[in-house]
Image (cartoon, helix red, strand yellow):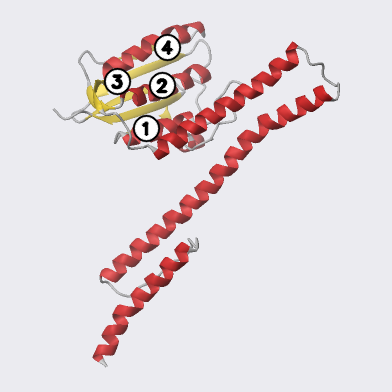
Amino acid sequence: MFSYLLARHVTNPISQLKEGAKALAERKFETKITVNSSDEFATLAEDFNRIATELRRFESQQSQWIMDISHELRTPLTILEGELEAINDGIIEPNQKAISSLQEEVALLSRLVNDLHKVSTLDRYSFNYQMEEIDFNTLVTLQAHKYAFKFQSKNITLNATLSEQPVIILADQNRITQVLQNILENNLRYTDEQQKVWLDLTVSKHHVFLSIEDSGPGVPDEALEKLFDRLYRTDSSRNRKTGGFGLGLAICQTIIEAHHGSIDATKSRLGGLCITLKLPLAEA
């Protein structure tokens, strides 16, 4: 009797795990298993359920991602199809104005495809970074100088409070430059004229912090947590002609997390949006 009960205690959880694994293989990610014990089998069951939950969440995100991409591609393609049909039917003359309109839609499609390629490349090669010691302070200073004229042309004041000393981090310089340019491009695109953009770099014992904030118009409170979601755009401040596709900040987050850092969006003290980067300093 004792041997029977012991064998049952061991084989029942194993059978449940076996059946659960089979269900996951069949993409039944809602599968859960229950083990009524407090030993290693219970811990294993908790881990199994956690994996099933993550797989279900990933599948949901993947489905939403495909739907969002389809939606983004459908709009310019529909416009292209409609304008080409109108030209073919003689409703629209094939003049320079019509050709320019078609070129705008093709350029829009090209930008979207390029951004999607960037995201997929970062996902696939997230560990393929050329890490080296770089001076983050110098890198930020360089980008601030590069964008100073662009901001000036839109009557936006660009201010920077940077470090007087080198700030050494272990990073891929091209990737970090890409992050800075994406954020500054957003500031340039969405900050109103006669407003301000401020870069503030501070250093702690183990990390460097860079806040890039503007004075308006900002985004709604409920949008702050969604800004890093792929293809998310706030309707109030973006449009398909002058705005992006909601991929820039998603790309930034992928790069920063690959550098063991973090990126957050909060309300700016200036009244707009504040993006804060946190990166670990290189070990002395």
- Look at discs 3 and 4 and give the one toward the viewer: 4
Q: Quadrant of the C terminus?
A: top left
Q: Position of residue 257 (x, y in %)?
A: 34, 36
- Look at discs 1 and 3 and give the one toward the viewer: 1
Residue 84 can be seen, yes or no: yes
Identity, as a three-letter code, of the amino acid under mark 3: Leu
First-in-chain label (2 vs 3) = 3
First-in-chain label (1 vs 3) = 3
First-in-chain label (1 vs 2) = 2
Name the secondary structure under disc 4.
helix
Name the secondary structure under disc 3.
strand
Task: Name the residue that disc number 4 marks.
Answer: 147
Name the secondary structure under disc 2.
strand
Q: CA distance from mark 2 to mark 3?
A: 12 Å
- Residue farthest to the left, as pictured: 284
Task: Name the residue that disc number 1 marks.
Answer: 255
Q: Are marks 2 and 3 in contact (CB under 8 Å)?
A: no
Q: Is residue 218 above or below residue 163?
A: below
First-in-chain label (1 vs 4) = 4
Q: Residue at x 63, y 38 (%)?
A: 71
Residue 237 can be seen, yes or no: no
